[in-house]
Amino acid sequence: MRIDIVTIHPQLLESPFQHSILKRAIDKGIVEVNLINLRDYSTHKQKSVDDYAFGGGAGMVMMIEPIANCINDLKSKREYDEIIYTSPDGEQLNQGHCNRMSTLKNIMILCGHYKGIDERIREHFITREISIGDYVLSGGELAAAVISDSIIRLIPGVLNDETSALTDSFQDNLLAPPVYTRPADYNGWKVPDILLSGHTANIDKWRHEQSIDRTKQRRPDIYKKFKGEE
């Protein structure tokens, strides 16, 4: 998989891809992540990429020209399965989206800034708009990192134990069950006996029941999807 992230602050995105699981995925050649500096496509002497909005109002808007120049240049070199814009009014990222996108080959992510981007970019280039939550960030870089991380970890070969991702929270619309490790008794706080029984079928049944109960209590919205009520 190749992920091209278009940003005006590439330095903000360097660290997430230089550590842990994401770094290992890149080092293995499973995924390629490129940070594209949008200012390189500006025709302005000062490399500016924003301007005042037509009609007035507070805040600046990312200009159409440098973004169009950048996207057209990247598209001339390869086809993209998705061109994503990080936007607070996009569809909210969920595990289902991540599962689907993890099967794609080429993804471009455009990081939003200021009051947003010229609407014509959204109309003519963007194939999907994604939000990571109902709040506003200073820019789309952190959102792009979240989206990338959530996708990359699902690609076969990235995790040492590929079954781990299948038991993550939100798979099958359920939260993950509680987990424990040694010691089995710490200050009188004991691990449930079922987990020490060695009976795999009973343990699996207990974990599934715990997932259902936890989802019902903590995320009733997701529980409704699990029950097929939405």
Image (cartoon, helix red, strand yellow):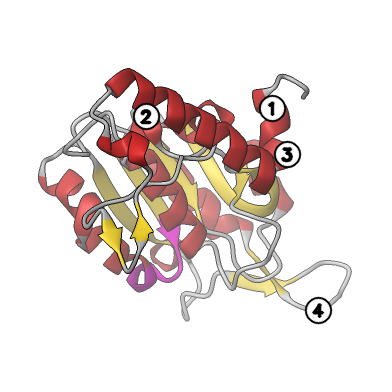
Query: How far, Cα to Cα, is label 2 from label 4?
Result: 45 Å
Q: Earlier in the sequence, mark 1 or mark 4?
A: 4
Amino acid of disc 2: Leu
Query: How far, Cα to Cα, is label 3 from label 4?
Result: 36 Å
Residue located beneath label 3 in the image: 221
Residue at 47% of width from left, 81% of height from top? 46
**Contact (Cβ within 8 Å) of mark 2 with mark 3:** no
Q: Is 207 in front, or is 108?
A: 207
**Contact (Cβ within 8 Å) of mark 2 with mark 4:** no
Quarter of image, res 78: top left
Q: Earlier in the sequence, mark 3 or mark 4?
A: 4
Residue located beneath label 1 in the image: 225
Residue located beneath label 4 in the image: 58
SS at mark 3 in the image: helix
**Residue farthest along the right direction in this orientation:** 55
Q: Indicate whether 227 appears above or below 91.
A: above
Mark 3 surroundings: few (<14), some (14-19) or many (≥20) residues within 10 A: some
* Closer to viewer: mark 1 or mark 4: 1
Amino acid of disc 3: Asp
Q: Is 33 contained in the magenta span?
A: no
Amino acid of disc 4: Ala
Asked if residue 184 shows in the view, the reply is yes
Quadrant containing the C terminus is top right
